[in-house]
Image (cartoon, grey):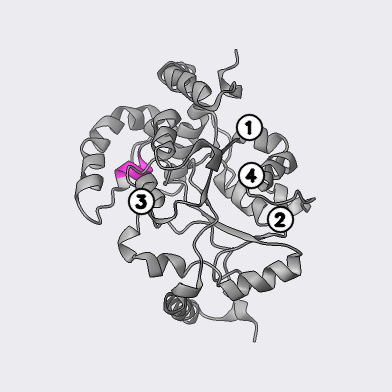
Amino acid sequence: MNRDLLPEPVIGAGRTLIRRYGMTTAALRPGPDFLLIGAKRGGSTSLYYGLLEHPRIMPLFPSARILPKRNNTKGVHYFDSHYDEGDAWYRSHFPSVGARRSEAKRAGGPVVVGEGSPYYLFHPLAAERAGRDVPDTRILLVLRDPVERAFSHYRERRRQHAEDLATFEDALAAEPDRLAGEEEKIRTVPGYRSYAHEQQSYRAQSEYAPHLRRWLLHFPPERVHVVIAEEFYADQQRAIDGVADFLGLPSAVLPKAASKVWNPAPSADLKDSTRQALAEHYAPFNADLEKLLDRDLPWTKP
């Protein structure tokens, strides 16, 4: 039978059964070797699927070979939105020891597995939770020009009919009121999820330095690798080679499919006055980030 012809209810039931099976066998499923923690609209999807083209990086369970009509899963969103599901639920998303062993034999060396949930970088509890639960994992993030990221984030919400405000400027003006008290609720109310904090924090999510510092409280710098989006898109092979080395893997010549840009968006003009205001707002954050990374950033160059 052609799996692509299966009705969605049948596919949904299959997914439920697979997740239950994964939870039942969770003790046989090691956790992540790496977490790709962000940033949202920074290129994390393109980086993650590019990494999956490496012969020694496995997809999550179940892979696209098992379930029809879907790509390989990228993110589990456990340490931000689904922490109350528990450790067995989280581990149910990872391949078993046996599957890893079989894949390692096929690939000619040890394999690694990770997930990419871009809200992790900004979520106020994700770093602490990950540091406690998976302290030996490695942390990846991809950062984009903060002005462009913020504007892209807004346009994504508009395309998905999830943002009522018709201009970016109105959304920026509304952001303080929308976010007021939300971080405190996330920290203090068990299981609380905030749409505004995750999806309408256009300006705030591009203030990278303090978010990264929060992760560095729980993971040493040598276990954190930052990719710059503009450099990644300019030379994806080189960027992925750098990630592979960070993960303890050899470089691999990747197929052309690895250079696909996922979730692209049509270009749009940003008002010069808005761009200038955001550039001024982000200037101290960029300076702090350059100090933190000990490198210049392409978006700070005149």
Is disc 4 placed on a helix, strand or loop? helix
Report the Cα–Cα distance between label 2 and label 1.
Answer: 21 Å
Q: Name which of mark 3 and mark 1 comes first in the sequence.
A: 3
Label 4 CA crowd tier, 10 Å (few <14, some 14–19, many 20+): some
Q: Does the magenta run of residues contain 199? A: yes
**Quick check: 268 left or right of 206?**
right
Report the Cα–Cα distance between label 4 and label 3.
Answer: 23 Å
Which residue is rendered at x = 55% and y = 72% of the image? 96
Residue carrying label 2: 54
Quarter of image, res 62: bottom right
**Nearest the eye: 105 or 275:** 105
- Residue 246 image label: 4
Is disc 3 placed on a helix, strand or loop? helix
**Quick check: 91 left or right of 55?**
left
Q: Which residues are magenta?
A: 196-200
Of the residues tagged 3 and 1, which is closer to the observer? Answer: 3
Is disc 2 placed on a helix, strand or loop? loop
Picture coordinates of residue 206, whole percent (x, y): 44, 31
Which residue is rendered at x = 80% and y = 50% of the image? 253
Disc 1 residue type (three-letter): Glu
Which residue is rendered at x = 42% and y = 40% of the image? 215
Disc 4 residue type (three-letter): Phe
Q: Is residue 188 above or below residue 76?
A: above
Report the Cα–Cα distance between label 3 and label 1.
Answer: 30 Å
Disc 3 residue type (three-letter): Arg
Of the residues tagged 1 and 4, which is closer to the observer? Answer: 4
**Nearest the eye: 220 or 300:** 220
Picture coordinates of residue 240, whole percent (x, y): 69, 45
Which residue of the protein is positioned furthest toward the bottom in this rendering? 1
Label 1 CA crowd tier, 10 Å (few <14, some 14–19, many 20+): some
